[in-house]
Amino acid sequence: MNNKKVACVGSGVIGASWAICFALKDLDVVVYDINDEVLSKAKTIIHDNLNILKENNVLDETRLQEVENHIKLTTSMEEAVRGACFIQESAPEHYDVKHQVVKEIEKYCLDDAIIASSTSGLLISEIAKNAKHPERFVGGHPYNPPHLIPLVEITKGEKTEEKYVQQAKDFYTFVNKEPVVLQKEALGFICNRLQMALYREVCHLVESGVCSVEDADKAVTFGPGIRWGIMGPSLIFHLGGGAAGVDGLMNHLHDSINLWLDDMADFKELPEDWPQRARSGVEEAMKNRSEEIGNNEESLKQYRDHMLIEFLKLHHKL
Ligand SMILES: NC(=O)c1ccc[n+]([C@@H]2O[C@H](COP(=O)([O-])OP(=O)(O)OC[C@H]3O[C@@H](n4cnc5c(N)ncnc54)[C@H](O)[C@@H]3O)[C@@H](O)[C@H]2O)c1
């Protein structure tokens, strides 16, 4: 990249993490937020997250300093976005805020800068509806935390031009992400739909007394989940089919699969009592875990981050 300046607009959970992701590739990141108090919190979060990378031997102290020095924080939108080739917007998830932010960004940014919104579910066409250049707006939906999880789902608005989609894809690839492009808008994008398809069945299995929340989690973690961390369900099924491949497996199991599908959950709304049942199930599961693998929110998070980092090293993503 010739122009190494990128901007993060919004420095909360997602914006601060994006800043780390970009700085790890030695890009010059300018982070904007509305006041110094918020920016000071972001600075601490950035520092703490870099320290976790250091504790897990991803960085040494010298490299940590280098990465941190690539990140500047400002309350001036002009300073943040002027001259930046890529702008990652991570402001609160409301159309009125996003519209205001788009207007501010476009006052100062380059005419051909890519503006990517981290939005979890708002429409890009709507976010960019008053924009001067709606053609360069894309959705760049990360998974939390973006400095660790490789996936980015790229979405297009009605007026987004293909060349900007391709440039966004190239940019995310450059910063070590694994972008996937949605060919048309879909609520929940790809991954939230997949997650909820599985979770709907978890609810159903627990509510109908087949297993506990703990055992459903265990079944995923030590069964398909551990394989899905290596490759997706289609490639895994392809191997499961042996010499016959995925089509062979589907043909072989066809009648059984149809029986399962017929018996599985197809409800359109979560059962009302599910949040409470989920909570009780999680509390019960935590009692049966050791501190080493996490048995409260803090130790669970530490264990998750440590395992995630080890796993990403295996994938050559860190
Ligand atoms: N939290 C997640 O797990 C997650 C995952 C993927 C995507 N997202 C998306 O990322 C975006 C940000 O979410 P978050 O979780 O970081 O929220 P957050 O509340 O942690 O951060 C939002 C930040 O935006 C700042 N802000 C407020 N008004 C602003 C303005 N006018 N201009 C610029 N910044 C402003 C806030 O001060 C805050 O620092 C949302 O669109 C959300 O849907 C969140």
Image (cartoon, rainbow, N blue to C red):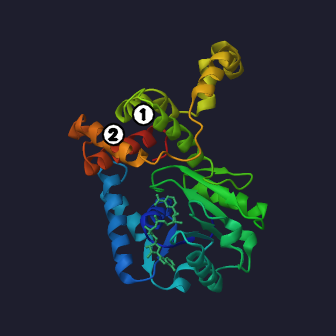
Residue 206 numbered tag: 1
Vertical order, 25 against 236 (above or below): below
Kindly indicate the quadrant of the structure image that contains residue 36.
Answer: bottom left
Label 1: how many residues lie within 10 Å, few (<14), some (14-19) or many (20+)?
some
Residue 158: x and y, percent?
A: 77, 65
Q: Is residue 176 visible?
A: yes
The kind of residue tagged 1 is: Val
Vertical order, 145 against 281 (above or below): below
Q: Is residue 56 visible?
A: no
Label 1–label 2 contact, CB within 8 A? yes
Judged from the image, the secondary structure of the residue bearing numbered disc 1 is helix
The kind of residue tagged 2 is: Gly
Residue 91: x and y, percent?
A: 51, 72
Q: Does label 1 point to a residue whose CB lies under 8 Å from ligand 1?
A: no
Residue 281 numbered tag: 2
CA gap, disc 1 to disc 2?
A: 9 Å
Decide if residue 195 is on the left or right side of residue 274: right
Residue 143 numbered tag: none
Residue 152: x and y, percent?
A: 58, 53
